[in-house]
């Protein structure tokens, strides 16, 4: 759409009535899944440090101990003020139930800003509920989208739909990089609503890496030597819910194990565990373990010879930690990792995966982190609260 279109003109008029110029004094922080807990933790810390009022709404999209509570414990986060306990559902049921739960809370608690992070159904539901919520029928609740502007340009991914909708409903778009900022401007979002802040994942890695060295014995517990194993994570709906695709990926990974002699350490996401069992797939060269806490996972990740993944967060973290990465997907919304030489997008064909692994194993690990300086949480709170 062109920036001068009548639709956008009306958008600008609407946004004139939002409280652009006042400092925010009360935030609602919404989270619901493993990556959101990790990536929102620097914002929660920043609010605590600066004495800014906030409350946390947990949607309950993730709920198993190792997908949820372990992160609150390890990252020393306050218990959520509200938990919607929504659990696993179809996309529409999950989104609808979260919307209804969040709307109720927003109408009683009346925050000025609701912060959502990333691209899950929790984000979509939080942004949609807030966008129609007028406190006392007059004051709108502004939406702040953390990690705005990422695009895979593949709308068959539920995450792509979620992030586009959240971006277009938001008043504050916290873009991690200039690439993300460009996507937003290209889609007609007024530049004054966009702030290039870096990604809070750098803060989370920096805040926890030393602690993880001290607290985690994961390598010795698994009998691993640094640089002598491969790390695998998989959970994308389009990869693990389709038998042929998952089978091909597992075949490709098995071939890498045979070629390198390195074990494949695989903390299995519950979705993937369920699908491997239901498709009755045979795995060779894998050491399947439960999903790990962040401190354990950081250790496993930082000492891996190579990571093979379809995760967004793992693409970023390996780039930050100077660990080579092969992304087992057809696209990425993190092209910065590819541009600096930290990552190859392999697709899901077994030969393409092995070929990408060969190339990444041969690359020097000298790239620079493109995701910011580790002060993103403070930067976002400063923008909103004018601290
Ligand atoms: C969700 C997000 C995805 C994100 C991922 C992070 C959407 C559409 N997807 O995918 O973008 O990358 O979280 O991990 O929002 N399950 C459990 N315990 C849990 C959570 C899930 O057993 O605590 C199992 C259930 O069988 C569930 C399945 O995992 O049906 C999928 O969970 P769901 O939250 O729907 O999607 P994720 O694959 O986790
Ligand atoms: N992670 C973790 N334990 C694991 C696997 C991943 O703590 O066993 C962390 C990882 O460090 C990253 C985040 O979970 O910060 C990524 O989450 P996930 O891959 O589930 O979602 P995505 O980033 O793809 O949305």
Image (cartoon, helix red, strand yellow):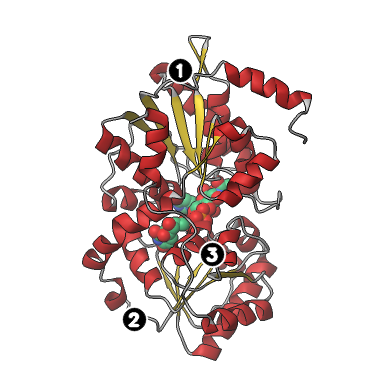
Q: Secondary structure at mark 3?
A: loop
Q: Which residue does the numbered mark 1 point to in the structure image?
A: 107
- Label 2: how many Cα within 10 Å (few below 14, some 14–19, many 20+): some
Q: Which residue is disc 2 drawn over?
A: 224
Secondary structure beneath disc 2? loop
Image position, residue 315 (x, y; %) = 51, 63
Q: Looking at the figure, which quarter contains the N terminus? A: top right
Q: Is residue 293 visible?
A: no
Indicate whether 216 appears above or below 221: above
**In the image, which disc is placed on residue 124?**
none
Q: For numbered disc 1, what is the local secondary structure? A: helix
Mark 2 or mark 3, which has the lower sequence index? Answer: 2
Query: Ligand 2 sits in which quadrant?
Result: bottom left
Question: Which residue lies under the disc numbered 3?
Answer: 234
Q: Residue at x 66, y 74 (%)?
A: 248
Dots 2, 3 in contact, CB < 8 A: no
Measuring 44% from the left and 62% from the top, which residue is drawn there? 317
Q: CA distance from mark 2 to mark 3?
A: 21 Å
Q: Is disc 1 surrounded by few (<14), some (14 to 19) or many (20+) residues within 10 Å?
A: some
Residue at 55%, 43% (x, y): give it.
148
Residue 108, image x, y percentages: 41, 17
Give whichever of discs 1 and 3 has the lower sequence position. 1
Q: Quadrant of residue 247?
A: bottom right
**Separation (CA) of disc 1 from disc 2:** 51 Å
């Amino acid at each position: 759409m062109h920036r001068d279109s009548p639709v956008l003109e009306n958008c600008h008029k609407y946004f004139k009535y939002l409280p652009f110029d006042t400092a925010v004094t009360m935030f609602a922080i919404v989270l619901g899944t493993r990556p959101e807990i990790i990536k929102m933790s620097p914002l929660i810390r920043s609010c605590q440090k600066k004495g800014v009022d906030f409350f946390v709404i947990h949607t309950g999209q993730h709920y198993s101990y190792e997908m949820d509570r372990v992160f609150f414990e390890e990252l020393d986060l306050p218990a959520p003020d509200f938990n919607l306990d929504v659990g696993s559902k179809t996309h529409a049921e999950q989104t609808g139930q979260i919307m209804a739960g969040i709307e109720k809370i927003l109408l009683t608690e009346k925050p000025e800003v609701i912060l959502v992070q990333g691209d899950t159904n929790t984000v979509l539901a939080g942004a949609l509920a807030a966008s129609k919520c007028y406190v006392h029928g007059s004051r709108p609740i502004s939406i702040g989208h953390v990690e705005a502007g990422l695009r895979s340009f593949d709308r068959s991914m539920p995450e792509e739909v979620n992030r586009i909708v959240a971006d277009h409903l938001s008043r504050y778009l916290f873009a991690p990089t200039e690439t993300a900022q460009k996507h937003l401007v290209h889609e007609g979002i007024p530049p004054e609503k966009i702030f290039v802040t870096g990604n809070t994942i750098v803060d989370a890695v920096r805040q926890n890496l030393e602690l993880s060295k001290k607290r985690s014995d994961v390598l010795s517990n698994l009998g691993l030597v640094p640089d002598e194993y491969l790390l695998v994570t998989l959970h994308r709906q389009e990869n693990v819910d389709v038998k042929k695709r998952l089978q091909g990926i597992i075949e490709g990974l098995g071939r890498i194990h045979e070629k390198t002699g390195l074990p494949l350490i695989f903390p299995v996401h519950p979705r993937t565990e369920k699908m491997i069992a239901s498709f009755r797939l045979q795995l060779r060269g894998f050491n399947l373990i439960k999903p790990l806490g962040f401190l354990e996972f950081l250790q496993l990740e930082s000492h891996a010879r190579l990571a093979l993944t379809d995760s967004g967060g793992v693409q970023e973290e390996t780039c930050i930690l100077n660990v080579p990465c092969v992304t087992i997907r057809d696209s990425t919304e993190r092209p910065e990792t590819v541009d600096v030489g930290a990552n190859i997008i392999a697709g899901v064909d077994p030969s393409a995966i092995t070929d990408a692994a060969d190339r990444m194993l041969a690359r020097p690990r000298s790239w620079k982190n493109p995701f910011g300086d580790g002060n993103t949480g403070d930067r976002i709170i400063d923008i909103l609260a004018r601290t």
